[in-house]
Amino acid sequence: MRRRQFLAALAVGATLPLAGCSDPRGSVRLLDVSDDATLAARWSVPTADLPESYRSLVVGAIDGDPDRATVTDTSAPFDPDAPVEHESGYYAVDHEAIDERTQTRYSVEATFDPDPAPETTVAYADLPAVDRTNLDGLLNPETRRDSGMALGASVHYTDAEAAESVVVPTPEYDGVTRGGETFGIAVVDVREVTVYDYRYRAEPLAADAAGLAALARERFRFAFENLPADQRAILDEAKDGGVHSEDPPSEGFSALVERFRARDDTAVEVTDYDGQWLLTYDGTDWWADVRYPEGMRDEPRNA
């Protein structure tokens, strides 16, 4: 999962579309990442920002604890494509499927601030550990929702876990309270699914921000040569919060985007819609966030 989408999706366990996808204009934004700490923070995902269940997996992998580093799901729940930061160290996190079997899958729905209010509630902290693990993102009071808005999550329980749960197969309470907020809780579907045990692994990448920044520069940093004046002007404007193309874009804007797309081999991440690069320009390192104009999206990219 791409880093920007991943951070936006953590709370509800789904990939959310990026804002502005319907805007036909392209854009270029440059962030000064000459400072090691700024570059490391831009490239990595801190464990402190992860939901409890993801954080436990990563820390378990870092600590070499196979029990904490293993999760059962129909697909890998956490698939970062950026380094993960933990206690000032940086790690490459991946996983492998080590087992396969059938389990019961429950579709659980949580309604924020329901009307009428639940007659019986339980505090999130008092839920059994298996319910807290499975429903952490769904019952997150920091996720912005309107009163009465319902979100769902598909979660699995073994027979033993279901016996411990107060949510499945039938909720013992109408609602859950957490962080001063109330959520109505309901099970709306039950089905059998094939699940896998995913074992997470963490490979050390760097001991500190300076080390990760050096690695980023080694892997991704590049410079354009012989930029014409109109393309330099776009980059200069992009330093001050970003610049949007016209619709349709100018020849200079399109040519600059093509220059970035020709460097897909050194991109930090790239799609048919946009990309991110580490660009050296006028003696400064810049994190370049480039969104393509509509007419250039979904086109074959240069190798």
Image: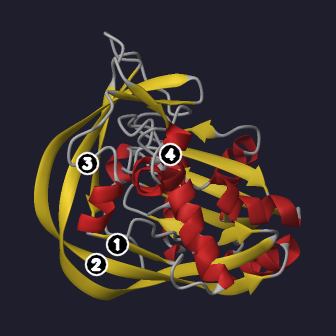
The image's mark for residue 168 is: 3
The answer to whether the residues at label 2 and label 1 have Cβ atoms under 8 Å apart is: yes
Q: CA distance from mark 2 to mark 3?
A: 20 Å
Q: Is residue 234 visible?
A: yes
Labels 1 and 4: the sequence-earlier one: 4
Which of the numbered marks, if any, corresponds to residue 72?
1
Q: Nearer the viewer, mark 2 or mark 4?
A: 2
x and y, in percent, of residue 236 in the image: 75, 46
Foreground disc of the pair 3, 1: 3
Whichever of labels 2 and 4 marks the residue nearer the N terminus, that label is: 4
Can you say which quadrant of the picture contains the N terminus?
bottom left
| Whether residue 173 is situated above or below residue 231 in the rendered picture | above
Amino acid under disc 4: Ala
Query: Any mark on residue 8, and which?
Result: 4
N-term-proximal mark, 2 vs 1: 1
Mark 2 sits on what residue?
196
Q: Amino acid at mark 1?
A: Thr
Q: Position of residue 137 (x, y in %)?
A: 46, 46
**Which mark lies nearer to you, 2 or 3?**
3
> Compared with residue 129, is residue 265 higher up or lower down, i.e. above or below?
below
Which quadrant of the structure image shows residue 115? Answer: top left
The residue tagged with tag 3: helix, strand or loop? loop
Question: Could you tell me residue 240's position as x and y percent?
Answer: 76, 38
Q: Amino acid at mark 2?
A: Tyr
Relative height, residue 167 to residue 82 (above, below): above
Q: Which mark is residue 139?
A: none
